[in-house]
Amino acid sequence: MEETGLNLQEVDFIIDHAFREDIGSGDITSNSLIPESTTAKASMTAKADGVIAGLPIARKVFEKLDSNLIWKPLVKDGDSVKKGDLIVEIEASFRALLTGERLALNLLQRLSGIATETAKYVKEVEGTKVKILDTRKTVPGLRTFDKYAVKMGGGTNHRIGLFDLAMIKDNHIKIAGGIAKAVAQVRAAIPSDIKIEVETTTLNEVAQAANAGADIIMLDNMSNELMTEAVQLIGGRCLVEASGNMNIDRLKGVAATGIDVISVGALTHSVIALDISQNICQL
């Protein structure tokens, strides 16, 4: 599991919590109707075109219910699929297949939806230096999964949380008494290997952030024309991020301004799940 970039301990924790929520004391319907020793075969099928993400997680769901399952993936995470393509074949306890179905599909569909949407954004800036970043606008408790799915779609992870990159925003600047003071105070308080990003909305703020030694300057809700000026003003002194209302129709124009990265909240905050079905094909 670690080879996929997913932390096994965290995957276990999330699935166990989801089981408590969904299964509770037991799947009373399946357990009442299906003998414990009955096995079955099932398959998952893509019901729409997209990019797959979350297969190792779906497998873990079923493994927790039947450690002897046989899992035969026909694609891997990051692969594109067409409507009607088989994704995986599973042989396991019939009870396990039914009890784990909803959780496995919920996770696989959401993560594949994120990967699919990310791939669209990445394709739009193909041929440029620009990278597509995610944000912290993720489902609470599922950020590791959401950001993993972004990577499977070809995107790049921004900060994981509040602990691995210092993001100085307007309220921080107000309390510090200005951008230069905010950058200086944060730099003095954090390890030297942690980067500092400053959110800006005007060229004056951009100049202050660049002069203060920010590692990254975010151009927030700026027009393409203003971003072009900002990039010229920064002059390569730091990484430049475009953010705010970044829909897919804007990407090419924004990329042409000379920025380095574009952060897109829509990759995770309002994603449409990829339609995937599970069917029992043999008892």
Image: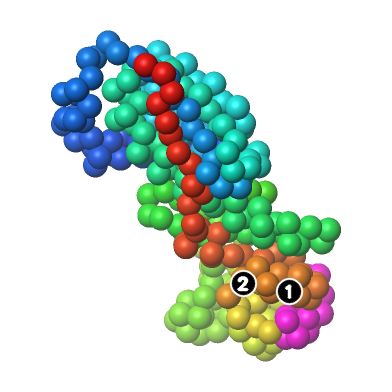
Would residue 140 be visible to someone looking at this image?
yes
- Which residue bears the numbered disc 1? 254
- Which residue bears the numbered disc 2? 246
Would residue 60 be visible to someone looking at this image?
no
- Dominant SS type (magenta): helix
Q: Position of residue 24 (x, y in %)?
A: 19, 35
Rendered image quadrant of residue 249: bottom right
| Numbered disc total | 2
The magenta stretch is 224-238
Q: Quick one: label 1, few (<14), some, or many (20+) residues within 10 Å?
A: many
Q: Foreground residue, 280 or 179?
A: 280
What's the colour scheme?
Answer: rainbow
Q: Going by the image, does 217 lie left or right of 190?
A: right
Residue 49 among those drawn in magenta:
no
225 up-or-down from 166: above or below: below
Extreme-top residue of the structure: 37
Residue 235 among those drawn in magenta:
yes
Q: Foreground residue, 76 or 170?
A: 76
Residue under the point 22% across and 27% down: 30
Whole-number angstrom distance, CA of label 2 to CA of label 1 = 9 Å
Rendered image quadrant of residue 61: top left
| Circles 2, 1 touching at the beta carbon (< 8 Å) | yes
| The C terminus lies in quadrant | top left
Residue under the point 40% across and 13% down: 68
Q: Position of residue 103 (x, y in %)?
A: 36, 38
